[in-house]
Amino acid sequence: MDQHTCLEPIRLAILGATGMAGREALLHHAWLDEQGKQYAEIACVTASSESEGSTLGSVICRKEKKLAQAYRFWKPMECPKSLESMVIDKLSPELIASKADYAISALDADIARDIEPKLASLGVRVFSNASAFRWEPDVPLLIPEVNHQHIELIEKQKTSGSIVCNPNCTTAGYTPLIHALEENGHAVNTIMLVTQQALSGKGDAIADQEYAVTVLGNVRDDWTKDGYNAEEWKSAHEPMKILGRIRSRDEAEMENRKILQGSPSKMIPIYSQTTRVATQYGHLECLMIDFGDRVDAEKIRKELILYDVDREVAKLPSTPARLFSVLDRMPTPKEDVLIGNGMVVVVGDIQQHTPCKISLWTLTHNLRRGATWAGRQGLELYLNRYAGMF
């Protein structure tokens, strides 16, 4: 068990601190300060090799300026004052491990695949937004409000540290809804999913003028290569690992074959189509849900309003007061993405179509609920379970 007290802040590293998700990790840290809920000190920040030795504030200012030039609607974020003079370290596992015991990783998957296991072998507890290890059977794919008990999978990892992953931004948006429906006794048969995903989900590559021209006034497919859309695969299958129905990618493919053959499967068939739209933050998702029995849309609406999460999760600093905010209308990114500081799942326009079919919208902040704020919530769950904090 890790030994910490609330009087002794943990030493935390932010990896990929100047990327989109990394910048949100810095904002989250500042928010915890403002709320009087802080339990960590940022001891190390890393970024690309070109940024080594620069200050956080200068790099972030430069990146946000480019985005504001590419998109008139872009509202630049500012590096928190308390962190803007921090000097960016080299992405060295040994250096990071000498400075920090915990890490929030906003690294690209290819880099994470190399760095994160090295950090775990050096005793660092890594909470990763990268996709590199999400499908390892002994790595939790964690949404604390849904599968907090999966944190115990780290006990099977044969390193002094550990890796915990949070899911893809689309998965984070509607998997809590599926879980809540099932907890309230509704058997979900199939889901049709169409997403409208914000530009920030693609990262700073969107500042490129050639890309901006293709997305402004348009809706794009940003993922399909050689006829394969990895984003749609993630959206359809990650919820099944989180819900405990499958454990590995091989098992997912085996269950897929059963579905294609019309045979019974452990998975809920989720038919996903993903799109990119020109908004700054917020993934909007339309779901058409078929149930095994009759349902009542108004009853589901009331159940979501009253839904309570596990008490252990509810007391974590980053957990919102309510998991769901339910609207009578379709939620919109411009008006609703910051409800609950971006950690709430906003549900709206619940419609009944047949006795066994409803449709609805979900909206989540793709860099908060869908990325590093959720990763930090996973760290808090670990600290509560294994270090007795909170």
Image: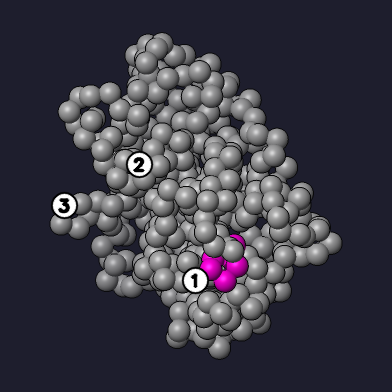
Kind of element beneath mark 1:
helix
Of the numbered discs 2 and 1, the one sitting upstream in the chain is 1
Badge 2: how crowded within 10 Å, few (<14), some, or many (20+)? Answer: many
Nearer to us in this view, 156 or 96:
156
Quarter containing the N terminus:
bottom right
Say which residue appears at 23% left-offset and 24% top-offset. Answer: 263
Q: Are marks 2 and 1 in contact (CB under 8 Å)?
A: no
Residue 274 image offset from top left, x and y in percent: 30, 46
Of circles 2 and 1, the one toward us is 1
Q: Is residue 48 above or below residue 220?
A: below
Q: Which residue position holds label 2?
A: 237
Nearer to us in this view, 83 or 119:
119
Of the numbered discs 1 and 3, the one sitting upstream in the chain is 1
Q: Which residue position holds label 3?
A: 227
Of the numbered discs 2 and 3, the one sitting upstream in the chain is 3
Query: How far apart are labels 2 and 3 at the CA level?
Result: 18 Å
Given the image, on which type of amino acid does mark 3 rest?
Gly
Q: Residue placed farthest to the front in the image?
A: 158
Q: Which residues are magenta?
A: 120-126
Of circles 2 and 3, the one toward us is 2
Q: Is residue 362 visible?
A: no
Nearer to us in this view, 239 or 198:
239
Residue 69 image offset from top left, x and y in percent: 42, 73
Say which residue appears at 42% left-offset and 20% top-offset. Answer: 187
Residue 118 is labelled as: 1
Given the image, on which type of amino acid does mark 2 rest?
His
